Amino acid sequence: MNVRSTVKAIVLHEGKVLLNRCRDANNGEYFSLPGGGQEQFETMAEALHRECLEETGYSVETVRFCALMEEICLDPFIRERYLQYAHKMLHFFVCRLTMTQRVEPTETDDLQIATEWIPVEDVPQINLLPKEVREAFSRLIAEEAPLFLGSVYLEHNHG
C-alpha cells in the first residue's frame, strides 16, 4: 500500500493567512495551504518548515496540530502515472512565522502561480482546496482540539 504522508501549514500573521494561489485544468484557479510530502526520516515539523520555505520563502514553526484528512484520487491517469499522489493523509498544523523577512522561494509547486496573504475573514468566500478546510477554517484556527475532516474521494487531485 502506498499512502503519502503530507503536512499543510495554516500560517497566521496579523489577521491574515498565507496561501498559495494555484491553477489547473480541472479546478481552475484556487488557493492551497503551503506544504507537501514528508520525506523519509523527516519529522512533520521539519517537513512543514522545509516545504513552507521552499514554496513561500517564509520560515515557520508549528504551534499545534489541528486536523487530519484522507484523500483518495479516483483519476485513472493519476493512479497510473503518479501513484504516490493518489492516496494521501493530510496533517494540518497551525503555524507562526519565525521571520517576517521573506527570501526567494526555491521550489514552488508545479501548479502554484503566486503566494498571497489573505485576510482570515475572506477565507469562507475564496476557492480554498480542499473544501473541507475552507468549511472548517474558523474552527481549525480557534479550537484547541484537533478535528478529523473526513475521508474523501476526489475525481481530480489539487495542490
Image (tube, rainbow, N blue to C red):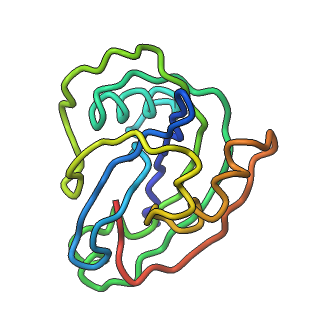
Residue 60 x %, y %: 46, 24
Residue 48 x %, y %: 45, 33
Q: Residue at 24% across / 49% down in the picture? A: 109
Depicted 104 relative to depicted 17: above or below: above
Quarter the C terminus occupies: bottom left
Q: Residue at 59% across / 50% down in the picture? A: 121
Residue 69 x %, y %: 60, 60
Viewer-proximal residue, 103 or 154?
103
Viewer-proximal residue, 55 or 119?
119
Depicted 83 relative to depicted 52: above or below: below
Left or right: residue 44 versus residue 4 is right
Left or right: residue 108 versus residue 100 is left
Viewer-proximal residue, 88 or 102?
102
Q: Residue at 66% across / 68% down in the picture? A: 150
Viewer-proximal residue, 151 or 10?
10
Residue 119 x %, y %: 50, 43
Q: How many marks?
A: 0
Residue 62 appears in which quarter of the rendering? top right
Q: Residue at 47% across / 15% down in the picture? A: 98
Depicted 69 relative to depicted 116: above or below: below
